[in-house]
Image (spheres, helix red, strand yellow):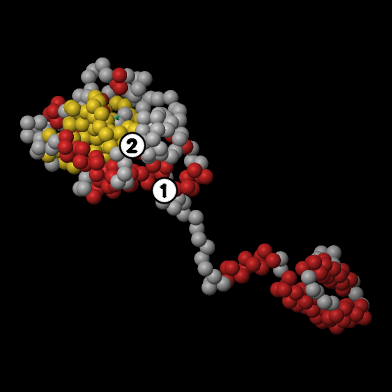
């Protein structure tokens, strides 16, 4: 057995390991459960005790040689993947990996822009609840008892008196009830309507409401404020027009159109070949509404306006289908991550 061990020792000394495959082969030959070293130890168990001492030393020396050879070669021929990884972990001078931090949703971008435009002319921000009572959503705003918006088909009622708000005009009422004029505020938020979902309608969407109440506020103030907003939001070249309209809570009432951003007023299917698109409703706050909210209409007057954020974002980013905003499609959302 002594000779066998010495022979093995020379063989190991002469072995050259030059690749990961050879390293694995070496391991299998010597170190695995069915490898040479294990066989030798089995053999060692049955030799006479007198020879055990000398041979034992030699056995351990062989074992050590094998292990050292294997360890040295392992450093050189680890698989490249784990090799690279260990390098990255230990090289602190490498630049940090940039995490993908995502971006804002297009509706948030537009809402933030609207809010900051009005902030510049001293409009503060106010919010109100999405679950609203009949008074704040309808009655205080001068909706007659038989108005169609009070119908189950248009509004999500929770019970007879409570519904999901159908517009952010309800926040006007809360603000007027809680603060004394002069009031100058915008009110962004989500609203709900009982509509079939399609490319142009959804059962919830977002609005920004605005009011200004003080002594001697006139329709001219309303127009100038909205002119300023349009120029800031869409640029100097965009044209504006007002059309007479009707809302229960304003008198007189108007709708405001801007020249179509996509065809520059030439006519396309977004503006239905009129060159104009409607972007908001507005008017002078009805004296009944002021009175309902504890403000004396003899002393104060005010204007109000309300616009849909989805609609403005559709025009600004040329989005054709409203549903795209809510499907969480990353390839759509990614387009806005740098804005
Ligand atoms: N509340 C209206 C709607 O949801 C929008 C609106 C129109 C708000 C005229 C106003 C306004 O404040 O004066 O369609």
Residue 165 x %, y %: 31, 30
Q: Is mark 2 within 8 Å of ligand 1?
A: no
Q: Which residue lies furthest to the front in this view?
A: 266
Q: Which residue is drawn at 52% across and 45% down?
A: 331
Figure quadrant of residue 208: top left
Residue 194 x %, y %: 38, 25
Q: Which residue is drawn at 21% across and 48% down?
A: 121
Residue 58 x %, y %: 84, 81
Label 2 to label 1: alpha-carbon separation: 27 Å
Q: Is residue 59 left or right of residue 210?
A: right
The secondary structure type at the circle numbered 2 is strand
Q: Name the residue under label 1.
A: 104
Q: Is residue 116 left or right of residue 67?
A: left
Figure quadrant of residue 264: top left
Question: Looking at the rendering, in which quadrant would you find the N terminus?
Answer: bottom right
Residue 236 against residue 58 in the figure, above or below = above
Q: Which of 101 and 20 is in front in this view?
A: 101
Report the mark closest to the observer, 2 or 1: 2
Q: In this view, does 130 lie to the left or right of 88?
A: left
Q: Which residue lies furthest to the top in this view?
A: 146
Residue 31 against residue 246 in the figure, above or below = below
Figure quadrant of residue 54: bottom right
| Ligand 1 lies in quarter | top left
On the question of residue 5 being in view, the answer is no
Q: Name the residue under label 2.
A: 259
The secondary structure type at the circle numbered 1 is loop
Q: Does the residue labelled 1 lie within 8 Å of ligand 1?
A: no
Q: Which of 239 and 310 is in front in this view?
A: 239
Task: For label 2, count other residues whose C-alpha is less than 10 Å away and answer few (under 14), some (14-19) or many (20+).
Answer: many
Q: Residue furthest left?
A: 298
């Amino acid at each position: 057995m002594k000779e066998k061990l010495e022979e093995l020792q020379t063989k190991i000394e002469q072995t050259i390991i030059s690749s990961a495959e050879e390293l694995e082969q070496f391991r299998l030959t010597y170190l695995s459960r069915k490898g040479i070293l294990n066989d030798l130890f089995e053999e060692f168990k049955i030799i006479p005790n007198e020879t055990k001492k000398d041979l034992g030393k030699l056995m351990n020396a062989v074992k050590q040689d094998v292990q050292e050879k294997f360890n040295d070669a392992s450093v050189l021929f680890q698989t490249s993947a784990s090799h690279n990884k260990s390098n990255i972990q230990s090289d602190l001078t490498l630049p940090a990996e940039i995490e993908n931090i995502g971006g804002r949703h297009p509706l948030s971008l537009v809402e933030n822009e609207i809010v900051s435009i009005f902030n510049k002319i001293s409009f503060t921000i106010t919010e109100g609840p999405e679950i609203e009572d009949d008074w704040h959503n309808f009655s205080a705003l001068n909706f007659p008892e038989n108005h169609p918006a009070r119908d189950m088909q248009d509004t999500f009622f929770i019970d007879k008196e409570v519904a999901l708000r159908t517009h952010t005009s309800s926040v006007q009422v809360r603000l007027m009830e809680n603060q004394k004029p002069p009031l100058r505020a915008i009110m962004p938020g989500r609203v709900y309507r009982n509509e079939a979902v399609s490319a142009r309608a959804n059962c919830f969407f977002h609005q920004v409401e605005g009011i200004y109440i003080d002594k001697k506020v006139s329709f001219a103030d309303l127009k100038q404020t909205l002119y300023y907003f349009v120029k800031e939001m869409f640029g100097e070249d965009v044209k504006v027009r007002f059309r007479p309209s009707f809302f229960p809570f304003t008198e007189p009432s108007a709708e405001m159109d801007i020249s179509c951003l996509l065809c520059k007023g030439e006519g396309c299917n977004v503006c239905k070949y009129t060159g104009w698109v409607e972007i908001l409703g507005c008017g002078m706050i009805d004296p009944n509404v002021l009175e309902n909210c504890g403000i004396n209409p003899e002393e104060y007057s005010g204007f109000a306006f309300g616009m849909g954020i989805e609609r403005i974002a559709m025009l600004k980013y040329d989005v054709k289908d409203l549903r795209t905003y809510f499907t969480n499609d990353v390839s759509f959302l990614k387009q806005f991550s740098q804005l």
